[in-house]
Image (spheres, grey):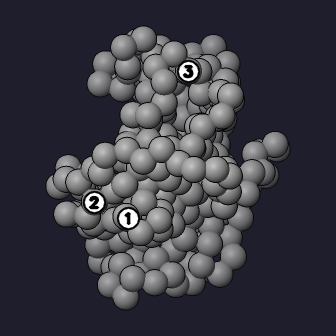
Amino acid sequence: MYEFTSRVRYSEIGPDRRMRLSALAARMQDCAIFQAESIGFGPEEWKKTKQGWIILSWQIRIHRLPSFNEALTTATWAYYFRNMRGDRNFRVTGPDGELCAEANSEWCYFDLVQQRPVRVPEAQTASFGTEPRLPGLDAPRRIELPDGPAEEKEAVAVRITDIDTNHHVNNLHYIDMALAYVPEESKVREMRVQYLKQCRLGDLIHPQIRSGSDFLTVALDDGERKPYAICEFRF
């Protein structure tokens, strides 16, 4: 297990002074990268080997959104490796140990030059190790789109600020794009995200919205009904 503690920054909160969901996911992503860096497999190693981890899906369960200036401890650990895949859990707790959020995530080890999955090096699986999986976070990676027509929103152009070191849209930006369509008064209790294909600078993203009494699903499409990512919010 790896963990770090840091206060909720002003830049991470919304109008209600509580942490934005994308900022919560960012803490988790940072924690995973900090762990990789601590054992010698961080961004500098990715740059040398031209290989690294890309995320395939999130399932984040929110028990309580942290408030501004609250000290949070974010912890992560891997629980499964096989061939080209690695899965890890996350837990975020407040200063008194109260559980704020927990998550499951699926990752793929990727050759950034050949643009294809490759086998996880044994040195990494040995260094990360595995620990027991969190119970109850077992939603499938695939998000099924609800039946019925979708409400199509205005297309969004990918900006240079959306692009990460792998030269495609960072996974957290998809979450922010989708959150723009969640009603402000809604209290999200669970968020799932499935990443399907890479989106690059200059591409257009076409949001397709489907909603019900207790959910909202946002498919971020390429204009031909082929999603780059799908986000599901449960209330």
Q: How many numbered markers are drawn?
A: 3
* Image-based side of 209 in relation to 131, left or right: left
Q: Residue furthest bottom?
A: 114
Residue under pointer 1? 222
Does the residue at mark 1 contact the one at mark 2 (Cβ under 8 Å)? yes
**Residue at image coords 44%, 42%:** 178
Could you say whether the residue bearing mark 1 is in a helix, strand or loop? loop
Tag on residue 186? 3
**Residue at image coords 46%, 84%:** 116
Work out whether residue 108 can be spotted: yes
Quarter of the rendering occupied by the C terminus? top right
* Image-based side of 182 in relation to 62, left or right: left
Q: Callout 3, which amino acid?
A: Ser
**Residue at image coords 39%, 34%:** 180
Pointer 1 or 2: first along the chain: 2
Could you say whether the residue bearing mark 3 is in a helix, strand or loop? loop
| Residue 189 sits above or below residue 17 on the image | below
Distance between the alpha carbons at the discs numbered 1 and 2: 6 Å
x and y percent of residue 142 in the render?
66, 61
Tag on residue 84? none
Q: Callout 1, which amino acid?
A: Asp
Distance between the alpha carbons at the discs numbered 2 and 3: 27 Å
- Of residues 58 and 219, which is closer to you in this image? 219
Could you say whether the residue bearing mark 2 is in a helix, strand or loop? strand
Residue under pointer 2? 204
Quadrant position of residue 145: bottom right
| Residue 222 sits above or below residue 114 on the image | above
